[in-house]
């Protein structure tokens, strides 16, 4: 068979096996990005500021159907751009050297098909990016979602190399057709080249939110395994993610006031069985907010709520590292501290930052 | 396009449907008529009924063929009429095909929460009528005197328009589900021109038949996309047990440009036809 004929046949077979193109390999290269304009690499002498932010696909505080506060499914282009501009303003205000984002959309109907990775690179001081999709389909035939491509991203002022997407376990409690169209989560790993510093790997994850079959724990354990493996090889690791569970010793573990969904599919309201799931991470790594600091005052470090009219009521977002954390540098930006932009209206998560001393 | 513009386009389609020509040396009576319907300019013999399990069902009138889809009719009311007002030529025959449908009901049904929601449940599809017209020319190939027409090669040229009430973009997001995308695109633009090429004929003992065709849709000025296209190739094999029963397998493809890129989707299709 000739080249074009073989290509057509392969395309047909691939299309027939995965008709809506939702699948991933167990291990595949991540998508690389560069800012449109070249930016100068900053001085590596100062501490590395790392920021973690679940940006909710630029949806701001519109009331989406899955939050059960409203019925919104799709956004208009001007709405997405308006929300992205506020996110970029906050990012520039906090000025991270490395930004890890969850729920960043690059080609989704719900976000007017704006490539948010590229947009953020072009509207912040960050220059390099890598992206790994965790939800991709030419069409999700449910709720009017349509085409989707959403996932985890790492953006940095320094070059990112050897980025890989590592597939995480799928939920077993769903039917095969649900699973086919559902999120396929990942660990995104990339090497950060900071001039004159030891090899540093950034590992990003967004663990499952709603599973009740242990999938979330598998995701957290796999994330830690990746950190452990890289650390054992002598690397500096920075593990960043929305782990969708609470720190050990959290005072409130269920019955959150913003849990208004009646559909079990979107309820994540009872963390009691997960009380110790993060203990190994806290035991083996330094956290942006030390555990005893958090346990002394939970509410100061809450980073999530689905109710924009309430206040942050749980901590789901973390940064773990084997590098030295600058004491007291970890912060959860729950409001417009120091006169900055109020974070409550930017996303359903608050950004988290920390400063690290790289050897 | 204004209401006057839509009315003008509709009048043009209807006028084309009523046009006739009778060149010298031609005949109104085909020397051999295929007993089964198809995507060609020939029509079913008068009073022949053809029922399909999944596809459209048809009825032959004198020089006309009526078609509707009984399964989807109550969700997507539609009627198709194919007629050959032109004279038969020894080498080819021409026909016009007009299809009128009411898509508003279907769009409302798929605007729903949960599985099967192709559009958000907050969508409010406008009142609309979709009118599709195609001009078909079929070349008659083969030994007419001994076997009738052995193979039919068909070219079509058509246009879909959808006169509709005005609506806000959020009331009807683009329905870009593969295969439906090109069929409902007229609702979002002034019209969707399309053309196709196809060939059909027997493969083995007048029992096993093939059909290969490709249809191209041009979809100008779609929201989020701009000008897009869709190319639908298909390949079908049909076994005709006798004059009354036929079973087919088909592989359809849709290569189309969407807002998120150009994608190929494949749809296997099986059907059973009963004719009498």
Image (cartoon, rainbow, N blue to C red):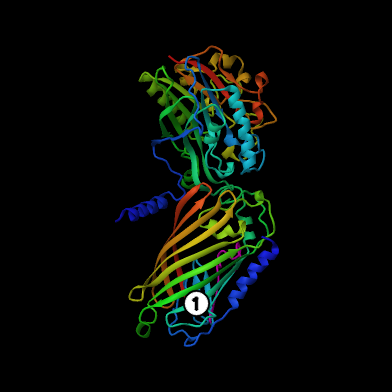
In depth, the one of A11 and A196 nearer the eye is A196
The answer to whether residue A275 is seen in the rendering is: no
Q: Which residue, given by chain and number where applicable, does mark 1 sit on?
A: B94
Residue A45 image point, x, y percent? 48, 14
Q: In terms of secondary structure, where does tag 1 sit?
A: strand
In depth, the one of A110 and A262 nearer the eye is A110
Residue B243 image point, x, y percent? 42, 78
Vertical arrangement, residue A184 with respect to residue B133, above or below: above
In depth, the one of B202 and B5 nearer the eye is B5
The answer to whether residue B175 is seen in the rendering is: yes
Figure disc tally: 1
Q: Residue at x 48, y 82 (%)?
A: B88
Q: Quadrant of residue A209?
A: top right
Q: Main secondary structure of the magenta part?
A: loop
Does the segment drawn in magenta span residue B75?
A: yes
Does the segment drawn in magenta span residue B72?
A: yes
Vertical arrangement, residue A40 with respect to residue A77, above or below: above
What is the quadrant of the N terminus of chain B in the image?
bottom right
Vertical arrangement, residue B165 with respect to residue B28, above or below: above
């Amino acid at each position: 068979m000739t080249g074009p004929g073989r290509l057509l046949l392969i395309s047909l077979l691939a299309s027939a096996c995965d008709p809506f193109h939702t699948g991933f390999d167990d291990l595949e290269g991540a998508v690389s990005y560069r800012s449109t304009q070249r930016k100068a690499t900053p001085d590596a002498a100062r501490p590395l500021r790392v920021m973690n932010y679940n940006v909710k696909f630029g949806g701001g505080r519109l009331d989406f159907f899955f939050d059960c506060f409203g019925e919104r499914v799709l956004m208009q282009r001007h709405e997405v751009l308006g929300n992205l501009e506020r996110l970029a303003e906050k990012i520039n205000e906090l000025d991270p050297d490395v930004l890890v984002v969850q729920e960043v959309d690059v080609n989704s109907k719900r976000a007017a098909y704006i490539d948010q990775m590229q947009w953020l690179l072009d509207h912040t001081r960050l220059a390099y990016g890598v992206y790994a999709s965790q939800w991709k389909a030419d069409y999700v035939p449910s709720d009017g979602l349509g085409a989707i491509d959403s996932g985890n991203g790492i953006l940095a002022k320094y070059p990112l190399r050897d980025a890989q997407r590592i597939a995480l376990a799928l939920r077993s409690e769903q039917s095969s057709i649900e699973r086919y169209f559902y999120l396929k989560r990942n660990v995104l790993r990339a090497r950060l080249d900071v001039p004159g510093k030891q090899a540093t790997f950034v590992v990003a994850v967004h663990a499952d939110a709603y599973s009740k079959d242990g999938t979330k724990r598998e995701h957290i354990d796999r994330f830690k395994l990746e950190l452990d493996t890289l650390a054992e090889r002598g690397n500096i690791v920075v593990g960043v993610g929305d782990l969708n569970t609470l720190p050990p010793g959290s005072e409130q573990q269920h019955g959150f006031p913003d849990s208004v969904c009646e559909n079990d599919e979107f309820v994540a309201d009872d963390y009691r069985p997960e009380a110790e799931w993060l203990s190994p991470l806290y035991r083996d790594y330094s956290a942006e907010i030390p555990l005893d600091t958090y346990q002394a005052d939970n509410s100061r470090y809450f980073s999530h709520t689905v109710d924009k009219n309430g206040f942050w009521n749980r901590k789901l977002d973390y940064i773990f590292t084997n590098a030295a954390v600058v004491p007291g540098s970890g912060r959860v930006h729950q409001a417009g501290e120091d006169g900055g932009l109020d974070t409550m209206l930017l996303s359903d998560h608050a950004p988290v930052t920390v400063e690290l001393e790289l050897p | 396009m204004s209401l006057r513009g839509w009315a003008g386009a509709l009048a043009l389609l209807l006028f084309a449907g009523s046009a006739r020509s009778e060149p010298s040396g031609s005949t109104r009576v085909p020397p051999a008529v295929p007993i089964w319907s198809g995507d060609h300019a020939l029509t079913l013999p008068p009073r022949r009924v053809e029922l399909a399990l999944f596809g459209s069902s048809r009825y032959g009138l004198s020089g006309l063929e009526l078609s509707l889809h009984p399964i989807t009719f109550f969700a997507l009311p539609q009627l198709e009429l194919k007629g050959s007002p032109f004279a038969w030529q020894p080498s080819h025959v021409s026909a016009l095909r007009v299809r009128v449908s009411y898509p508003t009901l279907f769009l409302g049904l798929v605007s729903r929460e949960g599985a099967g929601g192709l559009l958000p449940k907050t969508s409010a599809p406008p009142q609309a009528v979709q009118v599709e017209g195609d001009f078909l020319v079929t070349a008659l190939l083969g030994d007419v005197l001994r076997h009738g027409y052995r193979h039919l090669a068909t070219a079509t040229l058509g246009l879909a328009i959808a006169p509709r009430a005005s609506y806000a973009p959020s009331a009807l997001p683009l329905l870009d589900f593969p295969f439906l995308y090109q069929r409902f695109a007229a609702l979002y633009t002034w019209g969707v021109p399309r053309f196709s090429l196809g060939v059909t004929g027997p493969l083995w003992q007048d029992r096993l038949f093939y059909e290969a065709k490709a249809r191209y849709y041009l979809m100008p000025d779609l929201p989020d996309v701009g000008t897009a296209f869709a190319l639908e190739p298909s390949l079908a094999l049909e076994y005709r047990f006798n004059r009354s029963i036929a079973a087919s397998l088909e592989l359809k493809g849709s290569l189309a440009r969407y807002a998120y890129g150009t994608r190929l989707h494949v749809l296997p299709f099986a059907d059973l036809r009963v004719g009498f």
